């Protein structure tokens, strides 16, 4: 995940205007479905995950990395692969 993104890059990526990005993100932020702030002056969206949620996300990513690396190593040790 990215700590910040520009409104322009989001609009370009999704093929919509900056105003639509701003409106949609504002709805998600207001309903607490997205932990972020919009700096309209500088055109930046900054995520601000709560510490617990951030720690949970990092733990899931770490566990996923461990599982994938183990599977890759196991497959590499198999003959004919």
Image (tube, rainbow, N blue to C red):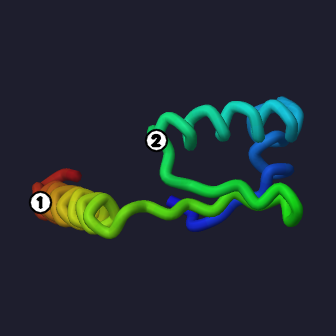
Q: Secondary structure at mark 1?
A: helix
On screen, residue 18 versus residue 2, left or right, reads right
Residue 15 image point, x, y percent: 83, 31
Quarter occupied by residue 41: bottom right
Q: Which of the marked residues, 1 or 2, is nearer the chain's N terminus?
A: 2
Q: Is residue 59 above or below residue 22?
A: below
Answer few, some or many: residues within 10 Å of disc 2's Cα (few below 14, many 20 plus, some between 14 and 19). Answer: few
On screen, residue 65 versus residue 21, left or right, reads left
On screen, residue 51 versus residue 11, left or right, reads left
Residue in view at x 88 percent, y 34 percent:
17
Answer few, some or many: residues within 10 Å of disc 1's Cα (few below 14, many 20 plus, some between 14 and 19). Answer: few
Residue in view at x 16 percent, y 58 percent:
67
Q: Secondary structure at mark 2?
A: loop
Q: Is residue 81 above or below residue 26?
A: below
Residue 55 image point, x, y percent: 27, 68
**Which numbered disc, 1 or 2, marks the residue closer to the eye?**
2
Residue in view at x 86 percent, y 65 percent:
42
Mark 2 = which residue?
32
Query: Relative to the observer, which residue lies in front, 58 or 23?
Result: 23
Query: Relative to the observer, which residue lies in front, 79 or 61?
Result: 61
Mark 1 = which residue?
74
Residue in view at x 49 percent, y 52 percent:
35
Whether residue 54 is visible? yes
Q: Which mark is residue 22?
A: none
Label 1, label 2: how far apart the Cα atoms are: 41 Å
Quarter occupied by residue 4: bottom right
Query: Relative to the observer, which residue lies in front, 27 or 79?
Result: 27
């Amino acid at each position: 995940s990215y700590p910040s993104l520009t409104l322009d890059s989001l609009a370009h990526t999704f093929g919509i205007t900056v105003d639509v990005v701003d409106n949609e993100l504002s709805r998600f932020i207001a309903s607490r479905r997205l932990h972020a702030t919009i700096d309209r002056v500088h055109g930046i969206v900054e995520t601000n995950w709560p510490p617990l949620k951030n720690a949970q996300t990092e733990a899931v990513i770490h566990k996923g990395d461990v599982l994938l690396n183990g599977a890759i190593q196991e497959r590499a040790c198999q003959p004919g692969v």
